[in-house]
Image (spheres, grey):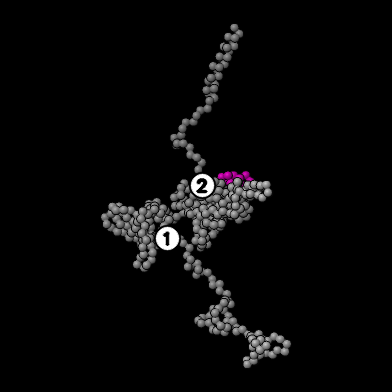
Amino acid sequence: MDRLRCLAVLLCFSLAAIPLSAQEKPQTPAPSQAGPAQPNAIPEPGHSPPIASNAPRMFKETRLEIIRDFETQLVYSRTVFPMGAKGLQLRNGQMAPNGQQLQQLLALWGPAIKAGDPAHISYVRMYGDHIHFDLNGGPIRRKKWYQRIEISGAGGTPVTGGSDDPIQNPHGSYLDLYFDKYVPEMTAAQLRDLLFPALDFTAHNKEEAYLDTLPPKVKDAIKAHHVLVGMNSEMVLHAMGKPPRKVREKDADNNDYEEWIYGQPPQDVDFVRIVGDEVVRVETMKVGGQKVVRTEREVIIKKPDEDQQAKSEPDMRPANAPTMRRPGEEVEGPKPSDSVNPLPPVAPPDVGPGSTPSSPGSQGPTDNIASR
């Protein structure tokens, strides 16, 4: 009888607990009409607040967080990085080297990363007044852990795992972001804004990153697959793709040019003439037989003017520069304002006890030696 009473009490408690558990069960939210939630995207550059002028030095926790956030991240280059041991420096939004110095490095070593190319941030290091970023492994390849192992044999001679000579990385470079006094406290978004002149964190592909570096007129023309007179060969490739045919010839002035031919009859055929690295003529043959020729420059791509820079450099000719003229010979033509004609050299007097100055008819030093 007692057993039946216990079972009845347990059954009553279980029936009373069922609605309570149903009420306490969390309700699953209804799916939103806007679609699935998007992952956290990198904000557009320029939307983060500026760094305060009295910001303290970067804390250790922030330093570790930025290193974890930026290392192994894929970015797109907004400028060209030269090959070799010398990378780029960014200070107050200005790149260095730039202009003629950058062109000389590119002519000497070639580009390691072009504008619009993807690059991996492989290494981040904090220094006193700047942050160092290695791109694509840096200009010098870092050793692997097994290359630092030394094994000693019975004779005690260590055997290393590889050569100690540094290995050049042709596709790697680096970027140094400099500050006035020290590296201040900042967020990851603020650091991305500072790096935006050189690196793009928001581009989704190489084409988008390259278009962001061009003027608006050129950008719109490339999107419309239209070639403008004044573009370079890389812009033509982005606008029209790789040409199916190329022809190399000489013009009436015996200048070499290259003609890129796009299209085939019965469609429109475009003939893009390139001299050096610039489009100088675009000829389009329409389906109806109409020929459209454009030779007037439609866009100006800024280039470092070597002749103008050479003319602007002052003449560093010293006052007593070496010359092939005899002593006392007059200079033909106008004389420089800072030049002074050197005086003719004076023959040294005879040295010796009881020596007297030699007369024009007396013997010289060579005759005295011969007479002895």
Residue at horizontal 52%, vertical 54%? 170
Q: Which mark is residue 277?
A: 1
How far apart marks 2 and 1 lie (CA) works out to 30 Å
Residue 61 forms part of the magenta stretch: yes
- Image location of residue 150, percent across then percent down: 64, 48
Residue at horizontal 66%, vertical 86%? 369
Q: Amino acid at mark 1?
A: Asp
Residue at horizontal 49%, vertical 31%? 29
- Image location of residue 229, percent across then percent down: 38, 59
Q: Looking at the image, can residue 218 be seen?
A: no
Please determine whether, in this image, residue 23 is positioned above or below residue 246: above
**Hey, which residue is sitting farthest right in the picture?**
353
**Nearest to the observer: residue 119 or residue 52:** 119
Q: Which mark is residue 74?
A: 2
- Image location of residue 23, percent across then percent down: 53, 23
Label 2's element?
A: strand
Residue at horizontal 72%, vertical 89%? 354
Q: Quadrant of the C terminus?
A: bottom right
**Hey, which residue is sitting farthest left in the picture?**
288
How packed mark 1 is, by other alpha carbons closer than 10 Å (few <14, some 14-19, many 20 or more), is some
**Nearest to the observer: residue 34 or residue 330:** 330
Residue 280 horizontal side relative to residue 91, left or right: left
Please determine whether, in this image, residue 118 is positioned above or below residue 311: above
Q: Amino acid at mark 2?
A: Leu
**Hey, which residue is sitting farthest front in the picture?**
155
Q: Looking at the image, can residue 180 be seen?
A: yes
Look at the image and give the residue range highlighted in magenta.
59-69
